[in-house]
Image (tube, rainbow, N blue to C red):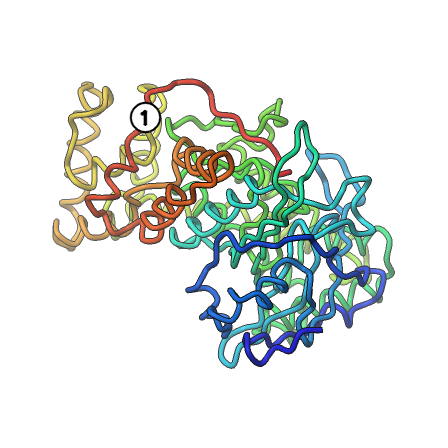
Amino acid sequence: MTKSKETGWNLDNSFARLPKSLFSSINPTPVSSPKLIIFNNQLATSLGLDDHALQSEDGVAVLAGNQIPEGSSPLAQAYAGHQFGHFNMLGDGRAVLLGEQTPPQGERTDIQLKGSGRTPYSRGGDGRAVLGPMLREYIISEAMHALGIPTTRSLAVVTTGESVIRETKLPGAILTRVAASHLRVGTFQYVANWGTVEELQILADYTLKRHFPDVEFDKSRYLSLLKEVIKRQATLISKWQMVGFVHGVMNTDNMTISGETIDYGPCAFMDVYDPATVFSSIDIQGRYAYGNQPPIAGWNLARFAETLLPLLHDNQDEAVELAQDAISDFTELYHSNWLAGMRAKLGIFNEEKQDKSLIEDLLSMMEKYRADYTNTFLALTFDKHEDMVLFGTPEFAQWHKLWLERLGRQEETKASSHQLMRNSNPALIPRNHRVEEALEAAVEQGDYSVMNRLLDVLSNPYAHSTEQAEYSILPASTTPYRTFCGT
């Protein structure tokens, strides 16, 4: 047990006080030669941690799972989930929750070690992770945070000094993940299938207290819980769509109750606008394609609603009706969020009935002429219409005329619209080829400078700096990009 005064750890583990069936108490498996590869100083400070002390030998020992900080009650969480539509018993097979950091000011946050060894839920796996995917999660999660999208975050990546066997020997690594919590739709599915109604109520009450204290004492608090989760997911998915993010594996165990993005395995960002965009090598049918993400979110939320039925009403039919009414609101909530965000991307402050068709017409042209999603909105923001085929077409000329007329019908000035667009259209996203370039340099050559430069330009995507312009250039290659589940 490591004393925590020097590092700032102030850990508790409220999850460990839930029914024992929800988790297994287990320590991380120690590693032979931990080495700190990257550390998030800004995040550490916001958590009340001493960034210098955490980068010391003792601090790194905690991040590697070799030492347990005072106050920690390490455990692996049990959960279930629909994976590509098929229900499975799951759980944290290679992750250990150290506990919840409770800074002097701010909310408690989960501290989890990912790749820290086998747990009872490993399903035959070795419980380890390799360096490339852990660095990938670090890059993408921090980029999502900078884009203003709710997400788990990354505190550190530590190499283990040990090889992990996949197709070949690869360097092992552990990611320290920070989350509002690791409660998932799959957590509720686990209890609904293998627990009691009493355990389900305990989990729901815990969730309300931790994430939704404003409705914790509502008369119909479990219905309020369902509605609040629906609201958060409607907001989250609309933000994904706004920046062209494709999660890649929207299983129910990868949907958080808190409304944060979690699990950056086969995710990627769309270049050319196409609703059918799929990157994951295992998503053969396109279930989790970019354009399918909103309806899949609704499907996942319906599974969440099913778990709550015993708490919504004593009468099964009444409970189903309440759940269906709540779920039916998701589509409207999502479209409302999406439409507001797309208006902002086009510099529109107020609402007109024709806005939806204006937006959809632009997207249809982008798809037809294979225009880059991010760079199209950048070109509109800065009135640079030279570099894409789309901008030379009669269709665009007509659309552009209608758009300018639309802007002219609002009270806000042209300068205000421009600023709104600057704030709503990122200068860059984590381009897939840039991420791969950074990972190759780090893993193959031990050169972390490429990754550090990428992280630096991604840290303020709305700055629109000269340096960022270089990172918005598309690759020359047209080879389809493929991603794989993290290993």
Q: Please state which of residues 214 and 269 is positioned toward the viewer in this rendering.
A: 269
SS at badge 1: helix
Quarter in which the C terminus is drawn: top right
| Image location of residue 349, percent across then percent down | 25, 52
**Type of residue at label 1?**
Met
| Residue in the picture at 56% in, 60% down | 178
Q: Image height check: is 24 above or below 206? A: above
Task: Give the vertical position of 391 relative to 439 (above or below).
Answer: above
Q: On the rendered structure, is 190 left or right of 298? A: right
**Quarter location, residue 81:** top right
Is residue 486 visible in the rendered structure shown here?
yes
- Crowding near the residue tagged with mark 1, few <14, some 14–19, many ≥20 C-alpha atoms within 10 Å: many
Relative image position of residue 9 (x, y in whole percent): 59, 74
Along the horizontal axis of the image, is 405 left or right of 89?
left
**Residue 32: x percent and y percent?**
69, 52
Residue bearing the label numbered 1? 366
Q: Is residue 232 visible?
A: no
Question: In the rendered view of the protein, which quadrant contains the N terminus?
Answer: bottom right
Q: Percent x, y for residue 292?
A: 54, 33
- Left or right of residue 162: residue 318: right
- The image quarter containing residue 197 is bottom right
